[in-house]
Image (tube, rainbow, N blue to C red):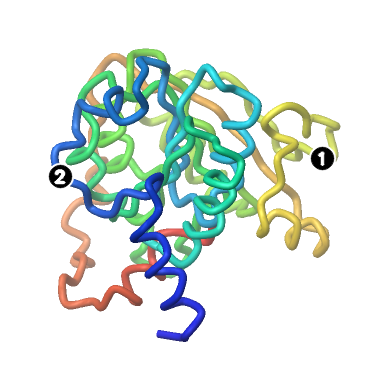
Amino acid sequence: MGHKKLIRFQAIETYKNVLQYPENMKGNWNTFFKNDNPITLELACGKGEYSVNLGREHKDRNFIGVDIKGNRIHAGAKIALAEELDNVAFLRIHIGQITNYFAPDEVSEIWIVFADPFLRKGKAKNRLTHSRFLFAYQQLLKAGSIINLKTDSIELYEFTLETIAEQGCIIHQNIADIYGKGMATGPLAIQTYYEKKHLEEGRTIYYVSFSLPATTITVPERFRNTGDEDDDSETIEDNEAIIGRG
């Protein structure tokens, strides 16, 4: 681990707005924030640009950036502390374990912004809009809550559209080119580090928002028993690499 990364990991251990694999948080986030305001999650948050910017604009809501990469979480957490954004926090966990940290109906919205599309063969199950993740989200989202996906990956975008159609999800917005169509307004105008790089390269940015069905999410047969199970022997650095791009 590099010296700068080590310093950042040591720093977040002292930040009151960063929780790393915390115990007994499930169902108790209102106590942490000292209010009952709605909670929005930014999954694979990286530097936490969405959590910080949304926290600035919506003081009547709470925002939690979730990622395994403490090195990147450090950036957003430091800004939130400096600006005294008490409605912004960061949770360092594996997203696959998210149901261990939130109770049913405890979350009101999810943002997935430029997460890793996992294009390698056999890695589709790691996409954050895969049905196994949608099932997990269903365990903590309030009914009718919106999930937002913003990505430069046409593969992830089309995969998501296919998945939500299979699961009977309700689409609220579907924009195939938010900048080309002049739709980069409000929350969609927030630009992450990676988004700025993608725009400089002339990439198209896709967006879809949807809510989960009342029926239970199921995993399609083609994704069962793929033989590509997670390897518990992976190091922290390996695991960091499979969660998101930030």
**Residue 175 vertical placement versus 239 (above, below):** above
Give me the residue at 33% from left, 35% from top: 134
Query: Who's the residue at 53% across and 32% down the image?
Result: 148
* Circle 2: residue type: Glu
The answer to whether 72 appears left or right of 14 in the picture is right
Question: Nearest the camera: 184 or 74?
Answer: 74
Image coords of residue 33 (percent x, y) = 36, 27
Q: Quadrant of the N terminus?
A: bottom left
Reading the chain from its start, which is encountered first: label 2 or label 1?
Answer: 2
In-image side of 224 versus 193 (left or right): left
Closest to the observer, 65 or 184:
65
Residue 52 image position (x, y, % from top left): 58, 40
Q: Residues within 10 Å of mark 2 (few under 14, many from 20)?
A: few
- Quadrant in which the C terminus is drawn: bottom right
Quadrant location of residue 40? top left
Q: Which residue is outermost to the bottom?
A: 2
Report which residue position mark 1 lands on. Answer: 179
Q: Would residue 52 be found to the left or right of residue 71 on screen? A: right
Label number found at residue 23: 2
Q: Where does residue 93 sit, x and y in percent of width and height? A: 29, 54
Which-is-in-front pick, marks 2 and 1? 2
